[in-house]
Amino acid sequence: MIVWNVNKLAVALRNKELSEWKKTQYYIATLFLQMLIAAISNYFFSWGGNISAVVATVIGILLSYFCIVGVYQSCQKHEELSVLEALIVLGFPVSIKLQLFYWGAYLVMLWGYQASMISAEDFTLVFLLLMPVYIVMFFLLINHAINQALE
């Protein structure tokens, strides 16, 4: 299973080198990773009922829709990749990379929070702003890999 090199994985998809079971494994791994980060975040930050979390989630849903449309359009230009194959299979290694960014940013912000003694509410609000960045980067990295593989 290729877990880091998104471009190599996009080429494998283009060349039809992945079985349906392998594609299913990537789908399962992607869902697991996404659910895990959501559960951990909710546990640590207790975002339930927080208006900032609701706003960030709505923004995330809207961004996801428009980004998925962008990936769909890229796949339609080339007709060599299925949009679902691209999102499912490329989503796993992209998620790993973004998790490293997400938690790295969290640690830097936590250090800054402790050094500056800003309020917990401000810290949570700033951290919630990472969600839209995460979503956009997720789809941009997938779109980039598609375009690189199909050049």
Image (tube, rainbow, N blue to C red):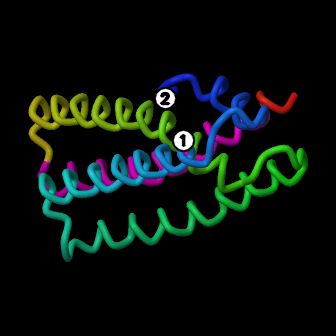
Residue 148 placement: quadrant: top right
Q: Is residue 95 left or right of residue 47?
A: right
Q: Quick check: can you spot residue 48? A: yes
- Identified by mark 1, the residue type is Lys
Please give the residue where the numbered disc 2 appears in the rendered image. Answer: 1
Which numbered disc, 1 or 2, marks the residue that appears first in the sequence? Answer: 2
Q: Residue 52 at x, y = what percent?
A: 30, 67
Q: Quadrant of the C terminus?
A: top right
Along the line of sight, which residue is nearer the eye, 78 or 23?
A: 23
* Residue at 21% over, 31% down: 107
Q: Are marks 1 and 2 in contact (CB under 8 Å)?
A: yes
From the top left corner, tell me how far across and down residue 103 is, in percent: 28, 35
Vertical order, 62 against 41 (above or below)? below
Q: Position of residue 39 (x, y in %)?
A: 22, 57
Q: Residue at x 19, y 51 (%)?
A: 40
Q: Amino acid at mark 2?
A: Met
The boundaries of the magenta stretch are 119-146
Image-based side of 53 in relation to 95, left or right? left
Main SS category, magenta section: helix
124 drawn magenta: yes
Q: Which residue is mark 1?
A: 22
Residue 46: image quadrant is bottom left
